[in-house]
Image (cartoon, rainbow, N blue to C red):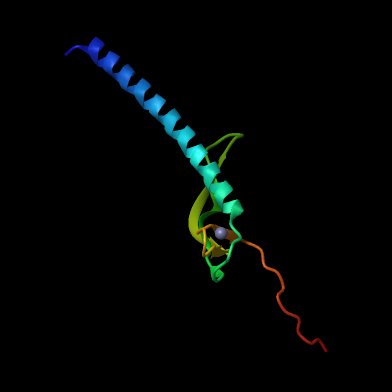
Amino acid sequence: MNYKKDIERLKRELREAKELTIKLEKQLNETKSRQNNLESNCKHQWGETKYDPEEYQEAVYSHLEGHGSDPEPIYNYYPAKKDRWSRVCKICGKKEYTYEKAPTKYEPKF
Ligand SMILES: [Zn+2]
């Protein structure tokens, strides 16, 4: 086993991986900004609004753990859903989300 050679190879591969990561991140950012530009030029035609709840882990306090003046609070996590709606543009495919609701009609009030 030649550890010195192994270390040199590891260093070289790491350097190559880091360079590739930087290059791809740059490419990704450029592509994202190009996509945003194209989407902002689209006169969106929104499809149907769908109820599309967001799933997340809700933290619920359980108890304190440890001793002394600095006990650590322990939480349990449960899957939960938050009301959310989405719509997709029929032309460019942009997907928009909202958590907000607005009144859409008025009804007679007595
Ligand atoms: Zn669009």
Q: Position of residue 56 (x, y in %)?
A: 51, 56
Residue 53 position, x and y percent, is 53, 64
Residue 97 % position (x, y): 58, 59
Q: Is residue 62 above or below residue 31?
A: below
Of residue 90 and residue 59, the one placed in the foreground of this image is 90
Residue 79 in the image: x percent, y percent?
A: 48, 59
> Ligand 1 is found in which quarter of the picture?
bottom right
Vertical placement of residue 56 versus 83, above or below: above
Q: Quadrant of residue 58?
A: bottom right
Residue 22, quarter of picture? top left
Q: Residue at x 46, y 35 (%)?
A: 27
Task: Please identify the residue farthest to the bottom as the structure is shown.
Answer: 110
Residue at horizontal 59 percent and vertical 62 percent from the top: 44
Q: Is residue 34 above or below residue 54?
A: above
Is 100 positioned to the left or the right of 33 in the image? right
Q: Quadrant of the C terminus?
A: bottom right
Which of the pair 106/37 is nearer the observer?
A: 37
**Which residue does the image show at 52% across and 47% down from the upper left?**
35
